[in-house]
Amino acid sequence: MRTADLRRPVVVLALASAAFLPAGCSSSSSSSPSSSSTAPAASTAPAAPDTIIIQNFAFHPASLTVQPGAKVTVTNEDSTTHTVTATGAKAFDTGDVAPGKTVTFTAPTTAGAYAYICSIHQYMQGTLTVS
Ligand SMILES: [Cu+2]
């Protein structure tokens, strides 16, 4: 018979103190219009733009497919300068991309597979496919 365990005066104290909390809590936040009607719905805008990341002396992804004339973003996350330079017809060339910098170039408008390299480290190779 442990009837003493059923007595919980702590609960009564907690309820009583909680009743005092909201009193006088005026944070003066009555000027926010909070209208969420301007958010555009999920449209045709691509979530992931055409992006080439340069990291550890390599292009990521090594093979990227974009639409004709697409804006391609190049981010150099290495600690040395790189380029994205099309081989052959020189269809595109970012020039020097300093460490930590982001540049863009325009993809060719003619469909095809365009091999590119880093003109500084020519063993770095990638392919930009326009289709
Ligand atoms: Cu390089």
Image (spheres, rainbow, N blue to C red):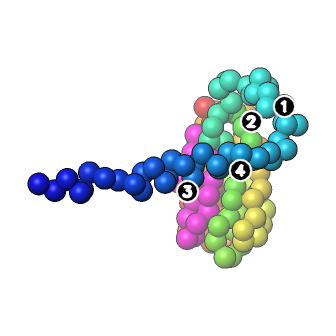
Tag 2: Cα neighbours inside 10 Å, few (<14), some, or many (≥20)?
Answer: some
The secondary element bearing badge 4 is classed as strand
The secondary element bearing badge 1 is classed as loop
Q: Quadrant of the N terminus?
A: bottom left
* Vertical order, 41 against 54 (above or below): above
Could you tell me the amino acid type at mark 2? Gly
> Which quadrant holds residue 58?
bottom right
* Vertical order, 44 against 122 (above or below): above
Could you tell me the amino acid type at mark 4? Thr
Which one is in front in this view, the residue at disc 3 or the one at disc 1? Answer: 1
Could you tell me the amino acid type at mark 1? Pro
* Vertical order, 37 against 11 (above or below): above
What residue is shown with label 1?
33
Q: Which residues are magenta?
A: 50-66
The secondary element bearing badge 2 is classed as loop
Tag 4: Cα neighbours inside 10 Å, few (<14), some, or many (≥20)?
Answer: some
Cα–Cα span, label 1 and label 4: 37 Å
Q: Earlier in the sequence, mark 4 or mark 3?
A: 3
What residue is shown with label 2?
69
Q: Residue furthest bottom?
A: 79
Which one is in front in this view, the residue at disc 4 or the one at disc 2? Answer: 4
